[in-house]
Amino acid sequence: MTSAAAAGGSAGPTPPADKRKSVTGTRKAMAAGFLLPALVLLGALVVYPIGYSLYRSFFDQSGSGFAGLDNYREIFTEDTILTAVQNNAVWVVVAPTVATALGLIFAVLTERVRWGTAFKLIVFMPMAISMLAAGIIFRLVYEQDPERGVANAVWVGVHDTFAESAGFPKAHPLPVHPLTAGGGGSFVTKTPVSAGTPALIPLVGVAPAKMPDDAEPAKAPAAGGSGEIAGTAWLDFTKGGGGRPNAVDAKELGLKGIKVEAVKDGEVVASARAGADGSFTLPASADGALLRLPAENFREPYNGVNWLGPSFVTPAIIGSYVWMWAGFAMVLIAAGLASVPRELMEAARVDGANEWQVFRRITVPLLAPVLAVVMVTLMINVLKIFDLVFIIAPGSSQDDANVLALQLYRSSFGTDADLGVGSAIAVLLLLLVLPVMFFNIRRMRREARR
């Protein structure tokens, strides 16, 4: 015991806690030396720009005169910037919510299919595309021309499935033809028709490429039987010339599907549609009536939706954003879903809960921390959205699709640049991001204490 005490005594007294070395044996000065380069970069790239932007936001366009709060006042009074603020609010509410909801649905459903991994790969693949490339892709997708824009090609196809497609929008008679304008875009015959006399309805103005694919050479009308009115509606134009007006020539095509109405005293007494060779037949009740080609034959074809017009440009761009980021949400939620105890779900099913109840009362509450992470991340991301809006929105609609990050660029580097207003917008963006960041930090600390 004596030797042990001696040995203990030779070790000397224990140093105070504040003078003890750290576990790694490093000193505070050495730790500061390692941190100094990072602190210098942080100050140069983050702290100084924030401080200078705050300072510059209180000066005028030239930077020489103190403007006070005028730049901030302009943000909420100038129409273009106010539109950007309103659009940012729409982005923050809609885009993260839709992307998170789709990610949740995809993550839950892909657990139940054999090819779930392949589906996740396909949905996540847009994350590998830059915002610039995605903007170029969706600028083409939203083209107004259905022959170029995929969105309108699909929309027009669906529309034409349930609604009758346009007939001959540019068709019209010549002065030598037995037709005249009937009002409202229609055409009527100059004289009434009678049984036994063929009815001729010649038109011009239809490009050969726009004629129905199954149109046949026009057939000259024969006299109708039993008092019927027989006639032919055809394109009175011979390619290469040589045709005769008001006469059916061999190379002229029938106007298949054109509607012909017999009108007496302002009322339609009979109607018919021309066949592939342009021929049509009306009953005897049409005797003595004027033949009318209603305006529906000549309306412009449905050309889809103007996705990049003032009304739809913001929802269209949000759609492209969701296409990119739904895969990100799906992957994070799927990772959280893998850690959910399956025993709870099975117990709920044994107790009689259906799949919707299991999803709503067990899956979603257990995934709440993951859903919060995804929502907060996407909210911070959409507050800085710039690339998609700048590329997708055409010049005519860019004011309607404007967001704060785009307005920051336009105010700072546009033709009439005002760095005071641009700096004020930058400070506003920082103030909008800070609450979301503080919420995320608090949530992370709360999770760490569990």
Image: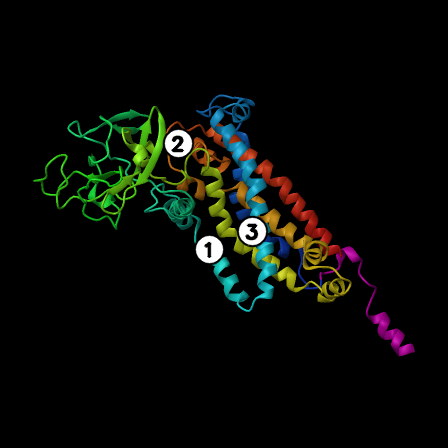
The residue lying at 48 percent from left, 31 percent from top is: 422
Query: From the viewer's perspective, is residue 312 above or below residue 320?
Result: above
Can you identify the residue that label 3 sits on?
A: 38
Region of the chain picked out in magenta, as a range: 1-22
Can you identify the residue that label 1 sits on?
A: 126
Looking at the rendered structure, the kind of residue marked 1 is: Pro
When asked about the image quadrant of residue 285, the answer is: top left
Instruction: Tell whether position 9 is magenta.
Output: yes
Disc 3 and disc 1 in contact, CB within 8 angstroms = no
Please state the horizontal and vertical placement of residue 196, each as a whole percent of the image: 21, 36
In this orientation, which residue lies closer to the viewer: 326 or 206?
206
Q: Residue furthest right?
A: 1
Query: From the viewer's perspective, is residue 340 above or below residue 131?
Result: below
Give me the disc on residue 414: 2
Please state the horizontal and vertical placement of residue 435, each as a whole percent of the image: 64, 40
Chain-order first, disc 3 or disc 1: 3
Q: CA distance from mark 3 to mark 1?
A: 33 Å
Q: Quadrant of the C terminus?
A: bottom right
